[in-house]
Every structure is written in structure tokens, then in C-alpha cells.
Image (tube, helix red, strand yellow):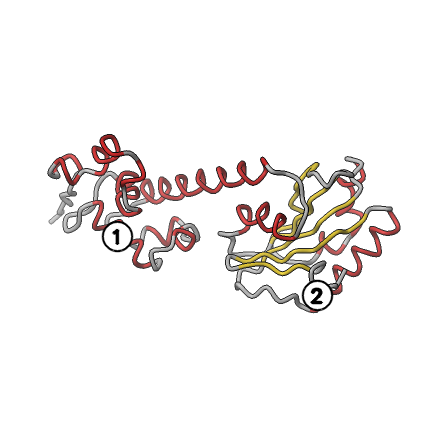
Amino acid sequence: MLTFEKRISIKAWAEEDRPREKLLQNGRHSLSEAELLAIILGSGNENESAVELSKRILQSCENKLDKLGKLSVTDLQHFHGIGPAKAVSIIAALELGRRRKETTSAADSRITASADVFKVMLPFMEDLMHEEFWMISLNRANRIISNKRISSGGLSGTVADPRIIYKSALEQLATSVIFSHNHPSGNTKPSKADIELTKKLVIAGDILEINVLDHVIVSDSGFFSFADEGMI
């Protein structure tokens, strides 16, 4: 016999428990992360309200939004009451937040230290489960001309060819560049391949009269700078 879930709608709650009304009356800062997530969900399941379901989802991520941002549509659908539509809504909301951070970091586009590189690159890399390699092209004032992803999935193939890497920098008349890639494991220590690639790119940059200012390895917990460590 077919059974149908009776989901607990936010409209059925007491008015003081409704996150939408709470946001309207008290502002967005008055809501917990679970309540904000509940607004996105709209309803829970037959056993949980949207807030209760949201709390359970967040608890599975140690109440850390960066871990929530790493979940896929399939991962989210493992929670009872989350179907494809709700899973996509969660991912879309988190992606909007990530892009907002990208816009904010791009607003202050002058690079003066490795920490500036980390600030610029973290929004692009913090939720990735694979490696990506990027190049920041700079003008004489160390302001960003462009920030370009060179490869995705590992440091091989495209990354190993300096001609491909430096093509856009030459086209944009960049005077210097900064390379960056992420370590999804969280360990920022450079590998032997990272060190060899950096040396190769510095040599190629010297030939093309493009100064390599730094190579920054990014993780959610911090960064490693080749320049800071005297390796460039």
C-alpha cells in the first residue's frame, strides 16, 4: 500500500517559531544557521520540522558551513526529507554566498603580501575536493589584471607546459604573475612535484621577462607561500 509523507510546513508552526516571520520582524542576524537553512528547505519530513531537519544536517557537518558546502546533491539526499529540488536549493544558496565572497575579495585587487593572495584565492578553492591550478596576472602596480584557472584535477598535462600557462599573461602585458593551487587534504606542505614545477615556471618567466612573485598553496585551514619561505 502506498503511503504519503505528511511534511511539517513552516506555516503550521506557532508564529514565534517561524523563521521567515522572525527574519521580517527582527532582521536576518537574529536567525541561527539552522533557521536560515530551514527557510531554504521550507518543510521538513513527517517526523521533523524544517528547523529540526536543518539542525541534523548541520550537526553532521560539525555545524561548519564550509563542510556543508562540500556536500553534493547525492550526499544531501541521504537525509530523510531532502529530495533533488531541496538539495539543489541548498547548493545554489551556498554558491551565491561563495560568489559574494569572490566579489568582495576582488574589490581590493592590489597584492602586497602572500596573505592577500590567500584572501583572493580562498573563495575559489575552499569547497573543492580536487586540485586546481590558477595564475594571477599583475601590472606594474601589483594590481590584478586577471585571475585564471589553468587546470583542474591535478598538477599534470596543461600545468606542465609553460607556453600554455604564460599565454594569457603575455597577451595582457602582465609584468608579474603569482601561481596558486589548493590541497584538498588540508596539508599545505609542498610536494616534490610542487617544488619542481615552481622552479620550472620561474625559469620560464625569467626568459619571458615575467617575474614570478609567489606560488601559494591554499587549504581551508591556511596557506603556504614559496616566497615567504625563500623558495622563489
Other residues around mark 1 within 10 Å, as few (<14) / some (14–19) / many (≥20): some
Q: Amino acid at mark 1?
A: Lys
Left or right placement of residue 53 versus residue 85 in this view: left
The structure residue drawn at horizontal position 67% and vertical position 44%, both measured from the top left corner, is 111
Residue displayed at 28% across by 34% down: 27
Within 10 Å of disc 2 (Cα), the crowding (few <14, some 14-19, many 20+) is few
Pick whichever, 5 or 100, lies toward us.
Answer: 100
Mark identifier at residue 138 = none
Q: Disc 2 on helix, strand or loop?
A: helix
Kindly report which numbered mark, 1 or 2, lies closer to the viewer in this rendering. Answer: 1
Of 210 and 6, nearer the camera is 210
Residue positioned 59% across, 38% down in the render:
106
Question: As drawn, which residue projects farthest toward the bottom?
Answer: 192
**With 72 as the anchor, is 174 left or right in this view?**
right
Vertical arrangement, residue 35 with respect to residue 80, above or below? above
Would residue 99 be found to the left or right of residue 40 on screen? right
Question: CB of mark 1 within 8 Å of CB of mark 2?
Answer: no
Which tag, 1 or 2, sits closer to the chain's start?
Answer: 1
Residue 205: horizontal and vertical position, in percent?
82, 50
Query: What percent of the width, then of the height, locates residue 182?
Result: 59, 56
Q: In the rendered image of this protein, does residue 220 appear above or below residue 84?
A: below
Extreme residue in the top direction = 24
Q: Tell me the quadrant of the picture where the C terminus can be found.
A: bottom right
In this rendering, would 120 be left or right of 143? left
Amino acid type shown at disc 2? Ala
Kind of element beneath mark 1 = helix
- Mark on residue 193? 2
Residue at image position (35%, 39%) is 89
Q: Whole-percent x and y of residue 220?
A: 51, 57
Label 1, label 2: how far apart the Cα atoms are: 42 Å
Give the number of the disc on residue 55.
Answer: 1
